[in-house]
Image (cartoon, grey):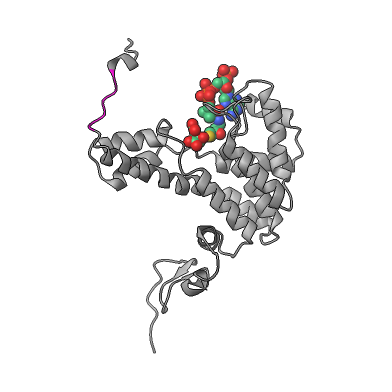
């Protein structure tokens, strides 16, 4: 009989061997019916299951709201400089993407990890924040360069408003807001930022759909799925910036001398 060749790759999300590809078992024809969107595709390819409408809409909101935040943020800056250096679209995009990390855009997973741990252990927000301080760790999901107590982040407000209306529970968001209440007593820019809000609300989403076991939720938080939302979203904006620079025929960027402190 036939001898099976050794398996090189194990893969479980997309099967392209049939007449049409399937995403977690759902074929393209089915996906194109009704009002399914990119949130459904993310649910299938990342979470390997169909999610209710309120959840896929929330995912789409995250993508839409994080798609861009102007030319001054780290990612856009790198992409703009790279594009102006004459590099191609992919190089300009990845140059921007590589700035996403613990300080910029990539604090969603850690925010989810720390908020979950602290809320599950029923730590009072002040205890949590002071514990983090003792360990020399900035609270992920808290703080912003331009947003503050009196200039709240509209994206955060929109996500909170949506979740309050459609999520069965917002336990983790409420915890994150209590953390914010405390950090704001220390400094006006220590607001719950967009990363922190998405991290907390994703915990609420995972817990409220009843489609994930506690072990699966632990795994999602441990592996770190959620920074992917910012990476995916911001790719849209970064591609826009790369193309914008070409369209505007911007030449090679050189930082002005007077913007540098030359020191010994
Ligand atoms: N302090 C975001 O810092 C920033 C503290 C804190 C306790 C904190 C900082 C931070 C955690 C990481 C995070 C996501 C670096 C941000 C994003 C997407 C974006 C970006 C955009 C977009 C800002 C001054 C004093 C120091 C610090 C203390 C600061 N943060 N203490 N917990 N979390 N946050 N990142 O203003 O005593 O003087 O030493 O790391 O969640 O990236 O639009 O720009 O869409 O593109 O530079 O929105 O908060 O302040 O570093 O000078 O710190 O505050 O310890 O205290 P800043 P620093 P002290 S959303």
> Which residue sits at x=58%, y=57%?
56
> Which residue sits at x=24%, y=41%?
87
> Which residue sits at x=54%, y=64%?
36
- Residue 132 picture quarter: top right
Q: Quadrant of ligand 1?
A: top right
* Residue 235, x across and y down, in percent: 41, 46
Residue 102 seen in the figure: no
Q: Is residue 137 magenta?
A: no
Up-down: is 204 above or below 15? above
Labels in figure, total = 0
Q: Nearer the viewer, residue 237 or 172?
A: 237
| The C terminus lies in quadrant | top left
| The N terminus lies in quadrant | bottom left
* Residue 64, x across and y down, in percent: 51, 47
* Residue 223, x across and y down, in percent: 55, 50
Q: Nearer the viewer, residue 157 or 253?
A: 157
Q: Which residues are magenta?
A: 251-256
Dominant secondary structure of the residues highlighted in magenta in the image: loop
> Which residue sits at x=41%, y=71%?
7
């Amino acid at each position: 009989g036939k001898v099976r060749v050794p398996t090189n790759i194990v893969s479980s999300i997309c099967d392209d061997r049939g007449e049409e590809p399937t995403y977690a078992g759902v074929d393209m024809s089915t996906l194109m019916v009704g009002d399914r969107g990119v949130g459904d595709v993310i649910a299938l390819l990342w979470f390997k299951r169909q999610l209710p409408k309120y959840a896929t809409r929330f995912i789409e909101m995250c993508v839409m709201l994080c798609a861009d935040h102007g030319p001054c943020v780290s990612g856009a800056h790198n992409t703009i400089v790279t594009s102006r250096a004459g590099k191609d679209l992919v190089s300009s995009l990845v140059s921007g993407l590589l700035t996403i990390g613990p300080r910029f855009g990539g604090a969603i997973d850690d925010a989810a990890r720390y908020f979950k741990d602290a809320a599950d252990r029923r730590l009072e927000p002040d205890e949590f924040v002071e514990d983090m301080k003792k360990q020399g760790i900035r609270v992920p999901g808290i703080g912003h360069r331009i947003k503050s107590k009196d200039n709240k982040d509209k994206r955060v407000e929109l996500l909170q408003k949506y979740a309050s209306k459609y999520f069965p529970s917002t336990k983790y968001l409420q915890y994150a807001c209590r953390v914010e209440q405390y950090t704001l007593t220390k400094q006006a820019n220590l607001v719950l930022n967009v990363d922190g809000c998405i991290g907390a609300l994703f915990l609420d989403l995972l817990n409220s759909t009843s489609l994930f076991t506690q072990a699966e939720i632990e795994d999602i938080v441990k592996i770190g799925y959620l920074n992917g939302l910012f990476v995916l979203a911001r790719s849209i904006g970064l591609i826009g910036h790369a193309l914008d620079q070409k369209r505007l025929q911007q030449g090679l960027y050189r930082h002005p001398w007077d913007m540098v402190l030359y020191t010994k």
